[in-house]
Image: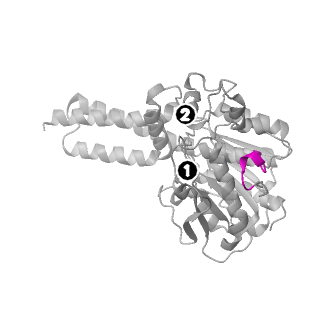
């Protein structure tokens, strides 16, 4: 291979790397059939910006070693790479804005002194600052302080009715409980794939976390996903004390489809039609923390425009078309279940979300604040893409900190030390 051909390949590699940077920088939404690829590029680059600097720099050094800077193509490739690296560093700085956005949201709703409600012993466990070790190993979720008990059955639907328990290795009793519901457009996903940073962090601090699978579409149609989640609550009420948890103090969270289901779960507490065969089980929660959810299936405010999800939902998720059964679509929409006795909510959404549009979250929060007697915290995270909390990153760590502070506030407010 001649130096000129090497430089041409280097230019192509530089443009490829810069395309990933641009995807995270632009925050596009209406991108048609390219959405899956665009989302992956934007998400992975926005949360792993410094890792992209590293691989692009390593590629540059490799091409240089083989003469990749020869001729105009090489010089142009180097210029493109420098521009990409500059953009990536700026993306990392954007990520650092998440901390102030979270704290501002909590303080505005709960009061500047909200943490003073948390007992000193619990407050001492809160992580204040983010260090490189908190994001430098994105996919390292194991902790020596946390025990994970996997694949415990909670219902009749085989492997889709299994759950995992995350608990401290030390003995605990009456520990607060978090129920984690995974996302995946109601059609894919598993309990091991989401919520790991938050659950491990909480378990290290004395919580018991329960992550569930549920039946997936298109085989399962709404409300079967939600019924499964409520069936898992039945298991928690009856069994979590065995694992050190307090069955009377359960919060719920989830992202994307899990955000939708966790919000709906909290707003449909003890609704008999959604817990067939176990109508007498208390399915209320003390708080809900939905991440980047879908809150109005019918999209009556036309938030999504030409990026409507209606066709997908009709084909794969809902039991009937919107025109044929609008009431079923209302029942699937958290915004239609807003109620005065809703539990405290902490709604989290990224302003750059290409899959679940932020305007939907804003409308849901407005409706919830108009009706609910309890606090509704809303954190809109600047430049954050969908799924930003799935693995360790700057934003993910800030989200974990904020949710922990919120949940500890809820716990203290309920009179738990």
Q: Which residue is tagged 1?
A: 394
The x, y position of residue 341, in whole percent, is 85, 46
Residue 100 in view here? no
Whether 233 is among the magenta residues is no
Q: Is residue 248 left or right of residue 167?
A: right
Q: Is residue 82 visible?
A: yes
Q: Position of residue 87 (x, y in %)?
A: 46, 37
Q: Nearer the viewer, residue 354 or 62?
A: 354
Q: Residue at x 75, y 46 (%)?
A: 273
Q: Is residue 9 above or below residue 192?
A: above
Q: Residue, x 66% and y 31% (percent of image)?
A: 359
Q: Are marks 1 and 2 in contact (CB under 8 Å)?
A: no
For label 2, the residue is: 354
Q: Which mark is residue 190?
A: none
Principal SS element in the magenta part?
A: loop
Span highlighted in magenta in the image: 267-278
Q: How many residues crowd mark 2 within 10 Å: few (<14), some (14–19), many (20+)?
A: many
Q: Secondary structure at mark 1?
A: helix
Q: Position of residue 114 (x, y in %)?
A: 80, 54
Give x and y (percent) for residue 284. Answer: 78, 54
Kindly give the residue lying farthest to the bottom in the view shown.
171
Q: Nearer the viewer, residue 208 or 230?
A: 230
Instruction: Give the image quarter of residue 118.
Output: bottom right
Is 276 covered by the magenta stretch? yes
Q: Quadrant of the C terminus?
A: bottom right
The front one of 331 and 124 is 331
Q: Quadrant of residue 81?
A: top left
Q: CA distance from mark 1 to mark 2?
A: 20 Å
User: Residue 3, relative to residue 120: is it above or below?
Assistant: above
Badge 2 marks a residue whose secondary structure is loop
């Amino acid at each position: 291979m001649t130096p000129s051909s090497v430089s041409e390949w280097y230019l192509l590699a530089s443009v490829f790397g810069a395309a990933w940077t641009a995807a995270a920088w632009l925050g596009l939404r209406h991108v048609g059939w390219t959405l899956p690829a665009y989302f992956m590029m934007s998400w992975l680059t926005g949360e792993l910006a410094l890792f992209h600097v590293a691989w692009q720099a390593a590629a540059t050094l490799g091409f240089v070693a083989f003469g990749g800077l020869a001729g105009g193509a090489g010089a142009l490739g180097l210029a493109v790479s420098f521009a990409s690296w500059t953009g990536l560093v700026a993306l990392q700085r954007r990520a650092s804005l998440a901390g102030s956005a979270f704290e501002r949201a909590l303080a505005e709703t709960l009061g500047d002194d909200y943490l003073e409600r948390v007992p000193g012993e619990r407050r001492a466990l809160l992580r204040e600052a983010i260090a490189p070790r908190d994001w430098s190993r994105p996919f390292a979720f194991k902790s020596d302080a946390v025990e994970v008990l996997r694949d415990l059955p909670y219902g009749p639907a085989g492997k889709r009715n299994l759950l995992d328990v995350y608990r401290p290795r030390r003995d605990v009793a009456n520990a607060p409980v978090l129920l984690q519901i995974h996302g995946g457009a109601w059609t894919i996903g598993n309990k091991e794939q989401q919520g790991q940073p938050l659950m491990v962090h909480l378990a290290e601090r004395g919580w018991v976390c329960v992550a569930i699978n549920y039946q997936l579409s298109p085989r399962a149609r709404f409300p079967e996903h939600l019924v499964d989640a409520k069936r898992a609550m039945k298991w928690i009420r009856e069994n979590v004390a065995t694992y050190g948890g307090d069955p009377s103090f359960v919060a719920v969270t989830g992202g994307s489809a899990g955000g939708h289901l966790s919000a709906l779960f909290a707003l449909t507490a003890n609704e008999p039609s959604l817990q067939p065969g176990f109508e007498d089980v208390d399915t209320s929660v003390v708080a809900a923390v939905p991440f980047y959810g879908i809150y109005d299936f019918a999209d009556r405010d036309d938030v999504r425009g030409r990026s409507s999800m209606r066709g997908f939902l009709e084909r794969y998720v809902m039991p009937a078309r919107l025109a044929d059964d609008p009431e079923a679509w209302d029942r699937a929409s958290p915004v239609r279940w807003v109620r005065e006795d809703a539990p405290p909510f902490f709604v989290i959404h990224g302003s750059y979300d290409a899959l679940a549009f932020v305007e939907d979250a804003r409308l849901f929060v407005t409706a919830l604040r108009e009706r609910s007697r309890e606090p509704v915290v809303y954190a809109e995270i600047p430049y954050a893409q969908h799924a930003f909390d799935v693995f360790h990153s700057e934003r993910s760590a800030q989200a974990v900190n904020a949710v922990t502070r919120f949940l500890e506030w809820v716990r203290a407010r309920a009179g738990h030390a």
